[in-house]
Image (cartoon, grey):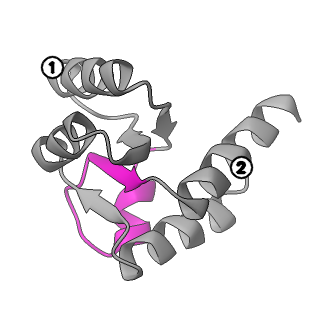
């Protein structure tokens, strides 16, 4: 996975207003069916992981696990464990980046 490109895409999502940060807000956004992808830090607590996973499954949205601290670096805010990306081309690019990284 190209961490720099991923960091840049997440930062772009935030600046474009396409990113909802925080586990509670991400779950609410997922429940509204307006998301194209869910992001979670690999250091997330088990309960947080379970809540976000269930919300992503119900919304039929891919849940992408990020390396520890990448979400913090990309957004410039510390302590962010989960995020939801609105449906659209930015979410599609993030998913594509993950899928190509898995195949490489």
Q: Is residue 13 above or below residue 3?
A: below
Give the extent of the magenta segment: 68-86
Taking the magenta stretch, the answer to whether it contains residue 47 is no
Q: Which residue is mark 2?
A: 97
- Residue 82 is situated, as x and y percent measured from the top left of the image, at 28, 45
Where, quadrant-wise, is the C terminus in this rendering?
A: top right
Q: Which residue is mark 1?
A: 47
Residue at the outermost right position:
104
Please name the residue shown 67% across and 41% down the image.
98
**Residue closest to the eye, 84 or 72:** 84
Q: Secondary structure at mark 2?
A: helix
In the picture as drawn, the residue positioned furthest to the front comes out as 33
Residue located at (19% from left, 56% from top): 79
Kindly state the secondary structure of the residue where label 1 is placed: helix
Sequence order check, earlier mark of 2 and 1 = 1
Is 99 placed left or right of 56 in the picture? right
Vertical relation: 43 (above or below) 84: above
User: Label 1 neighbourhood size at 10 Å, few (<14), some (14-19), many (20+)?
Assistant: few
Please state which of residues 50 and 29 is positioned toward the viewer in this rendering: 29
User: Which image quarter: residue 57?
Assistant: top left
Tell whether 98 sits left or right of 20: right
Foreground tag (2 vs 1): 2
């Amino acid at each position: 996975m190209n961490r720099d490109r991923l960091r840049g895409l997440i930062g772009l999502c935030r600046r474009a207003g396409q990113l909802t940060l925080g586990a509670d807000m991400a779950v609410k956004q997922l429940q509204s069916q307006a998301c194209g992808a869910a992001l979670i830090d690999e250091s997330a607590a088990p309960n947080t992981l379970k809540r976000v996973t269930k919300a992503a499954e119900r919304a039929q949205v891919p849940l992408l696990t990020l390396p520890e601290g990448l979400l913090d670096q990309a957004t410039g805010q510390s302590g962010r464990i989960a995020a939801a990306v609105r449906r659209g081309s930015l979410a599609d690019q993030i998913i594509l980046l993950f899928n190509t990284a898995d195949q490489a």
